[in-house]
Amino acid sequence: MTIKKGNKVKIEYEGSLDNGQVFDSSKKHGQPLEFTIGEGMVIPGFENAVIGMEKGQEKTIKIEPKNAYGERNAELVKKLPKEQLPEEIREKVKPGMVLGMQTPQGQMPVHIKEVGDNDITIDLNHPLAGQNLNFKIKVVDVE
């Protein structure tokens, strides 16, 4: 059966960056990734690569940022006064930390880039924004 819109699929995958660093895999999660084609549950480039494959088929793909998490947006890097942080974490915050920020759309991860005496620099870009994503994929099942 050739995969098309509406099919529920199970995919084994390993995702890496151009430098070879693996950022995610189905093995890490202990089971194949399950999603329905056309429901927007995965990045567009991944879903488009699976369309037309068949059960048991394997391939390697490269997804450019525009079909993954987009390009990095400099406007999403912001400097905030430390006093806007909850008091219990103001002095504990360090570069590299990820904090949860409440937005109208729900909880959003915020990456701390720099910490000054009175302010912090946060990055709201997805950590994989601006990067090519390379995937080895294998179709395990198609419904």
Image: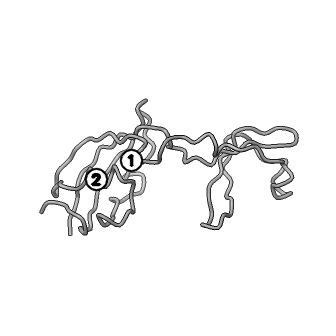
At label 2, which amino acid type do we have? Answer: Asn
Whether the residues at callouts 2 and 1 have beta carbons within 8 Å, the answer is yes
Residue pointed to by mark 1: 67
Q: Is residue 51 left or right of residue 24?
A: left
Q: Is 62 in front, or is 96?
A: 62
Q: Is residue 9 left or right of residue 109?
A: left
Q: Secondary structure at mark 2?
A: helix
Q: Is residue 85 left or right of residue 134?
A: right
Q: How far across and how far down the image is residue 2, in percent?
A: 14, 60
Residue positioned 50% across, 43% down in the render = 128
Category of crowding for the residue at label 1, using alpha-carbon neighbours closer than 10 angstroms: few (below 14), some (14–19), many (at least 20)? some
Q: Is residue 125 left or right of residue 2?
A: right
Residue positioned 20% across, 70% down in the render = 143
Q: Secondary structure at mark 1?
A: helix
Residue positioned 37% across, 52% down in the render = 27
Residue lying at the far left in this picture: please name it. Answer: 1
Total numbered badges shown on the rendered structure: 2
Q: How far across and how far down the image is residue 67, in percent?
A: 38, 47
At label 1, which amino acid type do we have? Answer: Asn
Relative vertical location of residue 101 with respect to residue 14 in this rendering, above or below: below
Q: Split into 4 quadrants, where in the image is the N terminus? A: bottom left
Residue lying at the far top in this picture: please name it. Answer: 19
Residue pointed to by mark 2: 48
Residue 122 quadrant: top right
- Image coloring type: one colour
- Considering only order in the chain, which callout, 1 or 2, is on the residue closer to the N terminus? 2
Category of crowding for the residue at label 2, using alpha-carbon neighbours closer than 10 angstroms: few (below 14), some (14–19), many (at least 20)? some
Q: How far across and how far down the image is residue 129, in percent?
A: 50, 43
Tag shown at residue 5: none
Q: How far across and how far down the image is residue 25, in percent?
A: 39, 49
Residue 52 quadrant: bottom left
